[in-house]
Image (cartoon, helix red, strand yellow):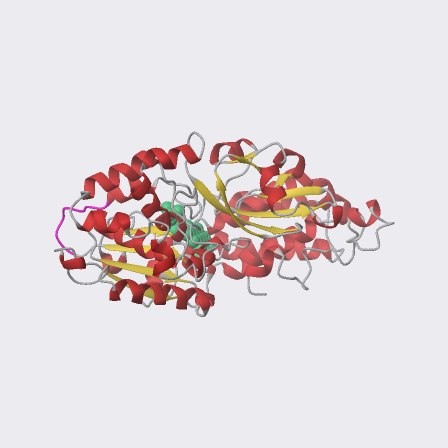
Amino acid sequence: MSDHRGSDYVVYGTLGLARPWTMGAYKSTGGYEAWERIVRGGISRDAIIDEMKKAGVRGRGGAGFPAGVKWGFMPRDDPGEKYLVVNSDESEPGTCKDRDILRFNPHALVEGMLIACYAMNAPVGYNYMRGEFMDEPFERFEGALKEAYDAGYVGKNVLGSDISVNLYSHLGAGAYICGEETALIESLEGKKGQPRFKPPFPAQYGVYGKPTTVNNTETIASAPAVIRNGADWFISLGVENSHGMKCFSVSGHVENPGNFEVRLGTPFATLLDMAGDIWKGRTIKAVIPGGSSVPVVPGEVMMQTNMDYDSIEQAGSLLGSGAVVVMDETTCMVRMLRRISRFYYAESCGQCTPCREGTGWLYRMLVRIVDGKGTPEDLDRLMSVANNIEGRTICALGDAAAWPVQSFLKCYGHEFKFMIENGGRSLLEVQNTDNQNIGNQNIGNQNIGSRDIGAQAAE
Ligand SMILES: Cc1cc2nc3c(=O)[nH]c(=O)nc-3n(C[C@H](O)[C@H](O)[C@H](O)COP(=O)(O)O)c2cc1C
Ligand code: SF4
């Protein structure tokens, strides 16, 4: 087996090896070296947390909160139960990077969980995977866990030391809201997956009411490489305020959609090139750079933007979960928004009125506009409903439903206005009357294919 040490990959380091999901493949990349050093007493809890803080590993689940700082919130010197929970719910439309960590490098997650559990003095870690992962991703992770138990890396008295850590898998039932960390905790406890009021935050009141840290799969799978190679190495991979590599799931109208682990700060144009550029020789129209909940950015702006937290914020959006949805010039933005709004309407847990009612109003108004029954007042009404959802709900699903509406209207309001004034006719149809493909190219319709933003969402 070839030695993959020295590669810059942080979480996809075993790709290219035979049976990359096995312990042998992972060890050839330097896997479990950090854990063995820790177990031999080489690195203290505080030193691990300090290294994670220094590396500036930002949470890869969406908000970008520094992982080392979060680990530091855990009252690790207090006696009693404490938990690590890995968020492998991965349901944000367009996002599929965690699935590939589970499929192709599950040992990075196992080792990351061990390191995180040790650093926070939590003897138990759970990996909560979305229900749809029940086949390959779940099985690969379970297989890796078994190998790690058999090798003595997990369990009671790891490698003969006084460290004991147990790790468990948990399968959800396929609800987007269970990706929200407190809904996930409720679901893990066997209850209905609905977000909790915060505060208290999970660091004080998490699983079974005990201190808990919830981190995304990619965040935790990054820890072994950081501890093995050092914070300076991780910092050198990215740019200021955005250190390390990041997995981007590129989907939509590109020739070669897929997951790409690249240095943070890589120009969007380079990433697009890696994904085979816009398909069918067409031109770029718009990009959703961080999963369907973040604001849309016009294509010409994205072509000048780098893929890091600050640059994408300057472009008016967020890096989010790293799901990059690319739309070509034939995309009808009204139908696209209708499709996105349907997702949030369907996935609202119904606990708070602005989200439960507002997401339905948004969706129904958009259906009305597409059906040719929109009224001129609908534009202001859409914006007003979105504004009244934003910031007024228990969890961020409300914001996630509002932001696409606000940004689509801001950047492409003329398409909505045209459709309302022309009985449901898309501006695109008029602009491209010569283009026979336009009707078939409707990204927002019900016949979505695997490249469509809605591919992750149950229709
Ligand atoms: C509606 C909703 C869905 C979410 N889905 C996910 C998800 O699928 N995976 C994830 O890691 N974080 C998701 N999050 C964010 C989590 O609540 C949490 O912030 C994250 O798991 C923390 O991990 P990180 O700090 O490593 O990013 C979601 C948040 C909301 C509001
Ligand atoms: S914002 Fe929506 S999903 Fe979140 S708790 Fe309220 S109703 Fe549920």
* 124 on left or right of 429: left
Residue 263 image offset from top left, x and y in percent: 48, 38
Image quadrant containing the N terminus: bottom left
Q: Vertically, is 228 above or below 315?
A: below
Residue 277 showing in the rendered view: yes
Residue 219 image offset from top left, x and y in percent: 38, 47
* 66 on left or right of 389: left
In which quarter of the view is residue 436 placed?
A: bottom right
- Magenta span: chief secondary structure: loop
Please state which of residues 359 and 81 is positioned toward the viewer in this rendering.
81
Q: Residue at x 15, y 46 (%)?
A: 41
Residue 394 showing in the rendered view: no
Q: Is residue 78 shown in magenta?
A: yes
Please state which of residues 301 and 40 is positioned toward the viewer in this rendering.
40
**Magenta segment range?**
74-80
Q: Vertically, is 302 above or below 379?
A: above
Residue 241 image offset from top left, x and y in percent: 42, 31
Please state which of residues 319 and 244 is positioned toward the viewer in this rendering.
244
Q: Residue furthest front?
A: 1
Q: Residue at x 55, y 65 (%)?
A: 458
Residue 161 image offset from top left, x and y in percent: 13, 55
Q: Residue at x 18, y 47 (%)?
A: 76
Q: Is residue 449 shown in magenta?
A: no
